[in-house]
Image (cartoon, coloured by chain):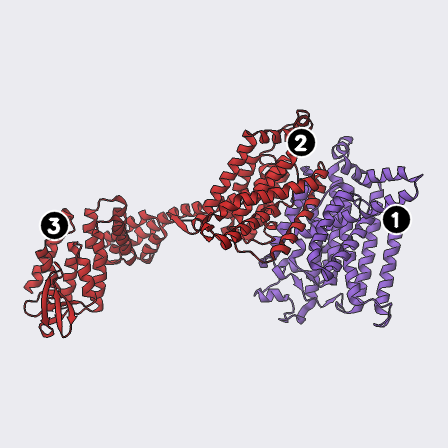
Chain colours: A red, B purple
Amino acid sequence: MRMLRCLATLFLLMMTVLPLKAATAIADADLTALVNALGAGDFDATEQAIAALAASGDDRVAGILDKLGNGELVTRKADKAVFIGEKADKDFKLTDPVTGADAGIVPKATVDKLKVNNKLRRAIATAVGTLTLRNADPKVRLAAAEAVMKSQDAAAIPALDAAIGAETDAAVKTAMISARAAAVLASDLPDSEKAKAVDTIADLGTRDALGMIAPYAGQAGPIGDAVKAATTAINAKLALWDAGQNIWYGLSLGSVLLLAAIGLAITFGVMGIINMAHGEMVMLGAYATFGVQELIRNNAPELFDYSLLIALPVAFVTAGGVGILIERSIIRWLYGRPLETLLATWGVSLILQQAVRTIFGANNREVGNPSWMSGAFTIGEMQVTWSRLWIIAFAAVVFLSLIGVLKKTALGLQMRAVTANRPMASAMGIRTPFIDALTFGLGSGIAGLAGVALSQIDNVSPNLGRGYIIDSFMVVVFGGVGNLWGTLVGAMTLGVANKFLEPYAGAVLGKILLLVFIILFIQKRPRGLFALKGRAVEA
Amino acid sequence: MLTYWLTNGFDRKAQIVTAVLVALAIVVPLGSLLPPDDSVLHISTYQVTLFGKYLTYALLALAVDLVWGYCGILSLGHGAFFALGGYACGMYLMRQIGTRGVYADPVLPDFMVFLNWKDLPWFWYGFDMAWFAFLMVILVPGLLAFVFGWFAFRSRVTGVYLSIITQAMTYALLLAFFRNDMGFGGNNGLTDFKDILGYSIQSPGTRAGLFAASALFLAFFFVVASALTRSKLGKVLVAVRDAESRTRFIGYRVEHYKLFVWTLSAVMAGVAGALYVPQVGIINPSEFDPAASIEAVIWVAVGGRGTLVGALIGAVVVNFGKTWFTGMLPELWLFALGGLFVIVTLFLPTGIVGLFARLKSLRKPPVAPVAVANQSGGAS
């Protein structure tokens, strides 16, 4: 009994002294006394001794407690001192748990094994958890705080209190305060404490926080009220995160639409050609990616992470080349007859589809993700996948380079000149047929680039292009023909609107609503959101 | 007045087409029903159904030609009107199944029982009566076309933009009809029909009757279209096609003319769909596929745009080719169809009919050149 009182005093002492010291090491003698307390009495006494050890915050404690849990500790019957006991034949080889010094080999009969029950095992686990709260590495401390947060163990509160006082890292401190609040809620502390804890949790504003306070929602008195207020506050925060997530998905869908539509914005918007085979250019780009990956897989697997980078120029040249071929052989005979162009290019799209189906087969082709495109990370409550992030970045790069080409290069200047006034451009010495072919090739090539990106998120099959052609036309028409910035705004608006409609209307109905919206929108503004003004429009 | 109007349209071309169609409507059913199965003259039920299907396609092509050939509206969504007419007819046929369905529910079609629905949705009321269903075959596509056209033509959406939004329309309907909640059988559509107007839908007699009905409806609408295009209204339509602004400046309400012919054309497409469904025995959302609508346009282009007869010829020839190819060389069909799109637009802008006209003019050099110049000028 005296021993116990002594321990309790010691414990209290540690609690008050340690936060001030904030050191992780205590004198060997003190630690030995604490360790010896493990073998001093019954299970209850051992539990208290474990808590005392844990509160010491010494680096060696975790190892000792671990051994206790595994049943490797023994007490010497003579003086009740605790050692690490290793079986050596019929004897025990003793080691001092604090200093690690050899304590000789003694017969089995002179030692008692320290027994643990389940309750003690739990106490050990908690103690080891709280111990790491005092670790020198902030990452370990953060992980420990999060562990307490999940387990909501009331026993960890004193250790947390101590740790919070000593903590210098702001992020870790926040985590600890939240963890403490979670533990307080689960404990049998007075209601006022708990209500305070609810407020602390409410400040977190995460989905986990909502889960932590949910069980107390029905309670009367200050806790129930606090929970109600906190739930409202958290839900408001979560709604913001949800909106953020929706915008993110929307931007991601928007950039896919932008990639698919931007080539069309060139051929349809700038040249006035209805290219129904545009989707097939995207499909060719995706198959070019597949081809490049196959080559790499068979010949140089170590280059696989660069396969997409290699595929980009290949896809651009393939799709662009096919585009120039189509322009030279078919479309140039049909300038000024947009409806006939539409039908002829539809025929081309059928031929390309069937050609790819004949060569590669009708099944989906496997296009792999390079390692830097797989995986995800979270920002607050938002999930961000790397592939989506890269596609958004890629769409931005393609868009800006295209603007650059049109605004800053000689080719771009000639393209715009031909668009604005063909006879005049021709009179100025621009070879308009040559520019036509290059413009169409550029638009098709960009569709090929889109195919590289889409191969990462969509099935690579001969029907890949079909799914995008109508959406692409909607984007271009909505944004305003002949205006790349309009295409950007159109793609992003439709992407975000689609994702915001989805939770309410479902994916399919949301899309139908958007189509109907665009049909009505065109009635109101037949030339799109950002209409070109001037004489070119009348032509 | 109406008699005059119709007789005026009943020119030599219309006389020949009507005569051929009426003859078909008599000869084919007789050939199917009278001679014994092993006779040379016998026409199998399969063939009757197949030709009947071609005739409904021809009616769809006629509808497309009316708006595209004579009014310059390239619709990439006529398949939607065709399918809506088909669905209206399919709903009637579903209600006729009664207790013979798999779940033997006296009122609810099988797919509704399967979806665990308790009551018939309101829009299925009345479809157990043939007259109501036929009214809907005309009203639903007509109304959709009227509303769509009223908005589109009033705000002067023309050319390519109109084509694209018609395509968006049929695409939106495609997505909508794929949904089970819509109450039209979702992905599977409506099928497993038992009888029509009290006759078993499988029997050779009914098939022959449906064939005859298709031929007669086609003949009727051909005469209507022919009369329409020869009337003053038809001349205005051609004027709209060739110079819309000028026609408007002369004082015509262009949008009224367009709306009229657009709605009429949609009704024709709806009737074609209604005749199509009992013959093929199924209607599903794939009929709304934009690709199907564009295919209908190429029938017209192959036959010869703006000639009416050309639409009929084109629909039958292309679909005959499709049947032959998909039977013999399924791999090559899309190449052939794609090539057809390219070749016809590049080398045969006047289609088969135009080709014949040119051949004829080569044989009769002294008189023909003037006539050809007029004709090709009008049809381009």
Image quadrant in which you'd find residue A528: top right
Marks 1 and 3, Cα distance to the nearest angstrom?
111 Å
The residue at which mark 3 appears reads as: A17
* Residue name at image x 28 percent, y 45 percent: A171
Looking at the image, can residue A526 be seen?
A: no
Label whose residue precedes the other's in the sequence (3 or 2): 3
Chain letter for the residue marked with disc 2 in the picture: A
Picture mark count: 3
The residue at which mark 1 appears reads as: B13
Indicate which label's residue lies in the foreground, 1 or 2. 2
Q: Which mark is residue B70?
A: none
Identify residue type, mark 1: Lys
* Residue name at image x 80 percent, y 46 percent: B351
| x then y, percent, for residue A460 | 56, 53
CB under 8 Å between discs 1 and 3: no
Identify residue type, mark 3: Val
* Residue name at image x 62 percent, y 67 percent: B110
Marks 1 and 2, Cα distance to the nearest angstrom?
45 Å
